[in-house]
Amino acid sequence: MSSIEDSGRETWRTRWGFILAAAGWSIGLGNIWRFPYITGKYGGGAFVLLYLVCMFVVAIPLFTVEFSLGRASKSSITTGYRKLAPRKPWFIGGWVGMISNILVLSYYTMIMGWLIAYLFKTLRAEYFGMTAEQISELFDNFTAKSSEVFFWQIGVYVVLGIIVSRGLVKGIEAFCKVAMPLLFLMLIGLGIYSLTLPGALKGIEFYLKPDFTKITGEAVLVAIGQVFFSVGIGFGATWVYGSYLGRKANIPGDSIRIALMDTLGALLAGFIIFPAAFAFGVNPGSGYNLIFVTLPNVFGEMPGGIVFGILFFSLVSVAALTSGIASIESIASWLMDELKWDRSKSRAKAVWIVLTGCFILGIPIVLSLGSWGNIKLFGLNIFGFVDYVSANILLVISALTMALFVGWSLGIKKFMVMANEGAKKMLVKPFWGLLIKYIIPLLIIALAFDAIF
């Protein structure tokens, strides 16, 4: 692959650079933070089985769809819909996806700030020797102190801005080529260590032995939602990464490889958390504060807990950074495409505009855990409301739009030609039409119905 097209739009320099960057987009907090506590909440092994089924039935087809539409349009999601379907309203679904992306980034960077802060708290052994109640109080006090959260969040924005401003090849691809191998090395190393803890086998049994009585309609819908959140379908980032692919790119094969890497990342995270949680008698389904309250209790009790904690928070921070990079790139690319800016001259400007806008948008979210905690929207604080709307409603609408567009407007035959250009052994087959036209939309509609009602 070359790095610059004749049109001036960058392309990936190497195939593995693209695969690692796209895997970096997928492997983030959805895998290492959200997947373990959702799995713990919905029965362990039974939920893992559901997750794997949803990955193959829903995620891989939609992943292939989004990459293919991006490559065909050579544009970000809203501009791309206009190119592929002129004078038709499909681009509205693209706007929904971008709004979801922006909203998620506005609080995702806050959580990234928490991670960096807790890395330093671990380095200082700040919570070691505390009781469980004191560790919980430490987290509550930290998140309520908005000025401190803003400090760490701004640091995250600066790091992300520097990387993305350097461009696709010198910034994003170069960073992910180093970060992703390091990420997997840390996942494997921490997983092996966690398996050596006394009582770890009980955690493995919970994690891998399915209890089919736990498979309910709610668990199925949660598994679909987790796959969307984890893989990153519908945000527009996959579309943009696809727009940087050349004609020889093997989209079906690489989509499967990236999805499998994403799945492996989530499964390895479980091998870290469940053995450790069961070894020290903590609840693996304790919720979003699992890695900030529950796991620090574990680190404080285990041998070598400081080293384990430092490596763990480093791991999650790297995963979060690679996802944040893709999110910013997709929003900045969308801004440049919509405003028809010269990409070679306007990249840095677009990136810092996006970062500034998301920071301002995120101010009420940070404050909602502190001085604005009494403000409620439909019974949720601002953070909870934004998270729920963006991940459970807007993202679902964006993914549904893509499936309906390919199945009922573009057409499966045209999509097959589009996706299979450059493909090798793995090809999009006609039976995908049944998935994209009927099964996936029905599952998405059920997910949306459950989220709203």
Image (cartoon, helix red, strand yellow):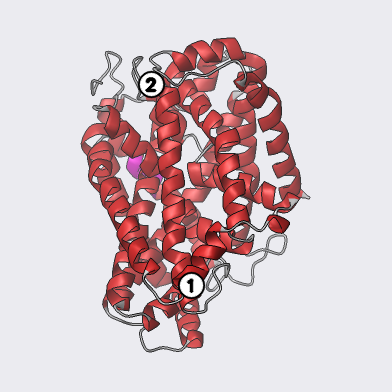
Task: Tell me the kind of residue under disc 2.
Answer: Asn
Magenta range is 351-355
User: Depth check: 433 or 104 in front?
Assistant: 433
Task: State left or right for residue 141 relative to residue 392.
Answer: left
Circles 1 and 2: CB atoms closer than 8 Å: no
In the displayed structure, 12 sits above or below 326; it is above
In 3D space, how far apart are the residues under numbered discs 1 and 2 (Cα atoms)?
40 Å
Quadrant occupied by the N terminus = top left
- Local packing at callout 2 (Cα closer than 10 Å; few below 14, some 14-19, many 20+) is many
Magenta residue check for 161: no
In the displayed structure, 380 sits above or below 259; it is below
Task: State left or right for residue 74 relative to residue 87.
Answer: left
- Percent position (x, y) of residue 407? 64, 19
Magenta residue check for 352: yes
| Residue 169, quarter of picture | top left
User: Depth check: 258 or 355 in front?
Assistant: 258
Q: Residue at x 51, y 68 (%)?
A: 203
Q: Which residue is mark 1?
A: 277
- Percent position (x, y) of residue 13? 24, 27
Q: Residue at x 72, y 60 (%)?
A: 378
Q: Which residue is mark 2?
A: 250
- Percent position (x, y) of residue 4? 24, 21
Residue 279 can be seen in this image: yes
